[in-house]
Amino acid sequence: MINTHRNEIIFTGGRMFTDSGIATPEMAVHTSKGVIVNIAPFSDLRSHTQSTEIIDLHGNLLLPGLCDAHIHLEAGGNSLGILNLLGMDATQIEAAFNLRAISQPTDSNWFRAFNWEPSRCAVTSDLLDRYFPDRPVVVHQRDLHGLCCNNIALKLAGITDSRTDPDGGRIGKNEDGTLNGLLYENAIPLVESVIPTPTNSEREQHIISAQSKLLSLGLTAVSEVLEAGADQIYRKLDSNGEIKLFVDAWQRVEHWEEGAPPPADGNRYQLRTLKAFLDGSFGSRTAALNQPYVDRKGNNGLLFYTDQELRDMIVRAQNAGWRMALHAIGDRAIEQACRVVCTIPDRGQFRHRLEHVEMLPPGLVDLLADSGMTASVQPVHLLDDQLWLESCIGAERCKSVLPIRSLSDRKIPTAFGSDFPVVDPNPLLNIHTAINRSGFGEKARDEFSPTEGLNPVDALLASTHGYAYAAGLETVRGAIKVGQNADFTVVSGVTDDLVDWSEAEVQMTVCDGVVI
């Protein structure tokens, strides 16, 4: 990673994205000590100082620093070192397991894999035992709302055939009542609680590794869902100057010491948000739906709070000065969140946010607008949803999946994220998907409402200003304006109309006036 600090920089010779469109190449941006101090024709700016470093953009596009409004940074860093099953079918997964078993025949430590996609193939405890009879194994589902473990792991966690489901969770069993190794939602901590935890030093390295990856992709700021004990780790890294991204951290509500106010901000770090799960996920069939899943008759998913419980929690958070980030994927959960938030006084000043917002029928769009919440969405999820979701919820409901243009039409504040490591954190792919309803070189599918593609300016705003607004930072970041932080992403290869990002490449990432 190049980390070059310059007190004075002028960025010139490129196109510049502003709220009103693309500025002409003769306009330049002057930054000083991490802040934008002037925007004017280059000829005017250069005369102001003789000690300024000049960076020629060579006609590339200068964007406000791209942001990811929903990410798991530490978990993403950890995932870089474990087996990735993304896109694998049963034959490929078994080959990967066999290779690992052969290469590590005497290893008795926990073995972990992630990004298993149940829509492609089944994984059971019997399968895991076949390849790993002598070591505990956990295979995480791609959406992180389910996992499969082998019988040694089940035994270590104290999970037996007679164990009943915990509240808000499900323990998978065969028809004869024996365990099949599958755990969902609030059953997951039963096994995770016995997995050896990494040291703080290892956790620091996970964060730094993930940060390097995200910086290389052009990201300058993220909203991070903290794991237990992570706040102190981030604050140490931040005080040591090792955090280059800006990190808007969230504490899980179950880890909150009730009544405690948000702590003081750091340099590139803040913690002002509490996260709560209202439902699960489509992949685990635990997202809360108003009508049952088409492939699981009688199953409407899981709703984790009553209306009164949810309202009381949000009011307690507001009284202590926190905003809420509410995970809601299914229409039943989204409806509950909007219905409850609409009853809470003074909600507008807290900028509560709804995370994922995947199934949003037309009537719920208006209710979401009335709630005043920000819609925090991950357009890139659409690429995976289009491969299998119809079999899960049916063709008619697929039309209501991620209606991003409808959010824009109703002036609902919108912020884009990725949910890394669940999906690819590439922000250019995210922007392209939001605009085109498809991945690079692909076509939008009729079953998923191609007309919900967003116009390019709004897609870029959701990737920059939308993040800043949701995090309460719009006065200092999210736009190329005098007085804002000097966080930029420089991109080549974008078409002039900003519609096609398939050939785009990140040429430079600038954080706090430092070229990374």
Image: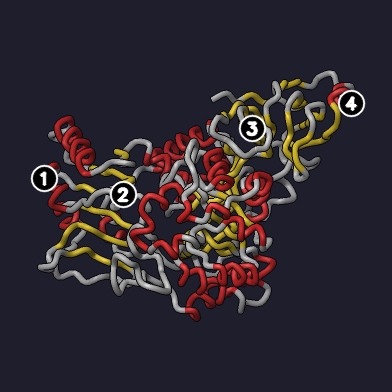
- In the depicted structure, whether residue 102 falls above or below residue 91: above
Instruction: Tell which circle, 2 or 3, labels the residue nearer the N-terminal end.
Output: 2
Q: From the image, tell me which residue sits under label 2.
A: 117
Neighbours of disc 1 within 10 Å: few (<14), some (14-19), many (20+): some
Could you tell me how far apart the alpha carbons at marks 2 and 3 are, in whole angstroms? 34 Å
Q: Measuring from the top left, give residue 302's x and y in whole percent.
A: 37, 70
State whether residue 124 appears in this view: yes
Q: Is residue 281 above or below residue 97?
A: below
Question: Residue 495 got which mark?
Answer: 3
Question: Where does label 4 land, which residue?
Answer: 44
- State which tag comes first along the sequence, 3 or 4: 4
User: In the rendered view, does 144 fall on the left or right side of 314?
Assistant: left
Residue 418 visible in the snapshot: no
Q: Earlier in the sequence, mark 4 or mark 1?
A: 4
Determine the residue positioned at 68% across, 51% down: 473
**Is there CB contact under 8 Å for labels 1 and 3?**
no
**In this rendering, which labeled residue sits more in front, label 2 or label 4?**
2
